């Protein structure tokens, strides 16, 4: 599996995580998790322009989140994770405690929903 395959891209996937999730947070980031049926963790991000007006700042936060996710990928449960920026982070402090937050959100989601219902997953016919 490539890291590129471990992304949330469809609005329906984001909506499912927003509707039914378990949360864990740091000072500036909330990680929401919901079990999935694809068998591996996937990542989605919501980084608001109103919190970080400059694109370079938003991209730095996204890189830090992706790197933390990549490092934790083998140990994370099969959940969809959505990372949402809730406050302006201190420069250089974006990824502090993020790996622990991913793990905590995933554990909470798996404890609440040990098996995700199969009806939530719709097969994607255009898998390339």
Image (cartoon, rainbow, N blue to C red):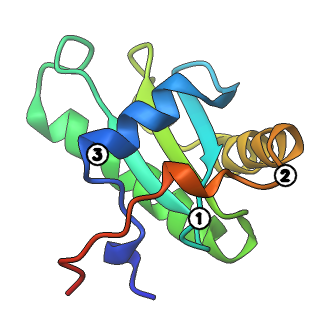
Residue at 76% from the left image edge and 41% from the top image edge:
109
Q: Which residue lies furthest to the right in this view?
A: 111
Q: What element carries label 3?
A: helix
User: CB of mark 2 within 8 Å of CB of mark 1?
Assistant: no
- Depth order, front residue of 56/83: 83
Q: How crowded is mark 1: few (under 14 residues within 10 Å), some or many (20 or more)?
A: some
Label located before the other in sequence (3 or 1): 1
Nearer mark to the viewer, of 3 and 2:
2
Q: Quadrant of residue 53?
A: top left
* Vertical comparison of 128 with 14: above or below: below
Distance between mark 3 and mark 2 Cα atoms: 34 Å
* Vertical comparison of 65 with 33: above or below: below
Q: Which mark is residue 60?
A: 3
Question: Residue 2, image x and y in percent?
Answer: 39, 85
Q: In which quarter of the image is residue 95?
A: top right
* Vertical comparison of 22 with 69: above or below: above
Question: Residue 112, image x and y in percent?
Answer: 84, 37
Look at the image and tell me whether residue 61 can be seen.
no
């Amino acid at each position: 599996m490539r890291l590129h395959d471990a992304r949330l891209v469809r609005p329906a996937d984001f909506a499912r995580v927003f509707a039914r999730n378990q949360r864990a947070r740091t000072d500036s980031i909330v990680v929401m998790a919901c079990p999935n049926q694809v068998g591996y963790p996937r990542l989605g991000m919501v980084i608001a322009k109103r919190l970080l007006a400059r694109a370079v700042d938003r991209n730095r936060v996204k890189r830090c989140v992706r790197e933390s996710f990549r490092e934790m990928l083998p140990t994370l449960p099969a959940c969809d994770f959505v990372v949402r920026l809730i406050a302006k982070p201190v420069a250089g402090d974006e990824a502090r405690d993020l790996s622990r937050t991913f793990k905590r959100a995933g554990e909470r989601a798996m404890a609440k929903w040990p098996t995700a219902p199969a009806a939530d997953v719709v097969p994607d016919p255009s898998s390339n």
